[in-house]
Image (cartoon, rainbow, N blue to C red):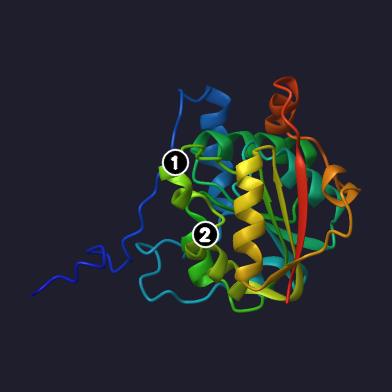
Amino acid sequence: MTQNPDKHPSGAPWRNFYGRFKGKSLRPNQEAYLEEDLAKLSPGAVTWEENPERSLLDLEALFGGKDVWLEIGFGGGEHLVHQAARNPDVGIFGAEPYINGVAMLLGKIREAGVENLAVHPGDARDLFDVLPEASISRAFLLYPDPWPKKRHHRRRFVTPEHLEPLNRVLKPGAIFRVATDIPDYVRQTLQEVPKAGFEWLAEGPEDWRQSWDDWISTRYEQKALREDRTPHYLTFRKR
């Protein structure tokens, strides 16, 4: 049988992934979080191996009819847990391929006792495949990997490969928040996100210089501030 060169043998499209899946060794308690908690919080049926038919997730069953928000690349999970605790009437999905970050999130979930979260420990593009169209009310992209070298800018999230499926799963009028301390990432965001069907809501400089009212500063932002880099807070709305 002739293989399709555009697809993995599993049926998945070829998608290069350039980040890390795992860093330094996990602590014993983090290993326990992954073993004991992850399966309960992960909906399964997201990866191509689990769901080769790409059947859509049942968000009604997962979140009980709540509005659903999505955080793409949640890092250590501070913001995700903060929003879940602040908004118990919302279901919040987090996607993060870096397993060390997933383990950190699971520890924070235990500590906070929040129950309105679901976790996909993998590539957000696989999650976009199985989310129903116009099902997400709000999305967050906070301090994404900057890929600073010019030849690597195509690896950034703010490219059509990611933004077009994100647009598909967002409801009309949904808010998309982007935070970054990298000036060139701001440039690319303001260039590419509107082309993908979003409008930037800033009316003046304070709208991107000041953080959102419900913001919690993450460890990535604290590192940026220590290194005298300036955070930018960009708010978009799906047209």
Instruction: Using the rendered image of the protein, determine whether residue 94 is visible from the camera's viewpoint.
Output: no
Camera-nearest label, 2 or 1: 2
- Judging depth in this view, the residue of 169 and 64 nearest the camera is 169
Query: How many angstroms separate mark 2 from mark 1 (CA)?
Result: 16 Å
- Foreground residue, 73 or 156? 156
Nearer the observer, 106 or 226: 226
Q: Which quarter of the figure has residue 112?
A: top right
Q: Which residue is drawn at 78% across and 70% down?
A: 66
Left or right, residue 76 beside residue 99: right
Residue 17 is situated, as x and y percent measured from the top left of the image, at 39, 49
- Tell me the quarter of the image containing the N terminus: bottom left
* Amino acid at the residue labelled 1: Gly
Give the number of the disc on residue 119.
Answer: none
Give the residue at x 26% y 67%.
7
Classify mark 2: helix, strand or loop.
loop
* Image location (x, y in percent) of residue 81: 75, 44
* Residue 105: percent from left, percent from top: 65, 39
Image coords of residue 2 (percent x, y): 10, 74
> Residue at position x 73%, y 77% from top?
239
Counting residues from the N terminus, which is met first, the one under dot 2 or under dot 1? 1
Q: Which residue is drawn at 75% across and 33% down?
A: 230
Residue carrying label 2: 159
Height in image: 234 above or below 238?
above
36 vs 226: above or below = below
Task: Judge whether residue 217 can be spotted in this image.
Answer: yes
> Label 2 amino acid?
Thr
Extreme residue toward the left, this view? 1
Please state if 135 lies on the left or on the right of 100 as rendered: right
Which quarter of the picture shows residue 228? top right
Q: What element carries label 1?
A: loop
- Rate crowding at label 1 as few (under 14), some (14 to 19) or many (20 or more) other CA atoms within 10 Å: few
Q: Residue 19 carries which label?
A: 1
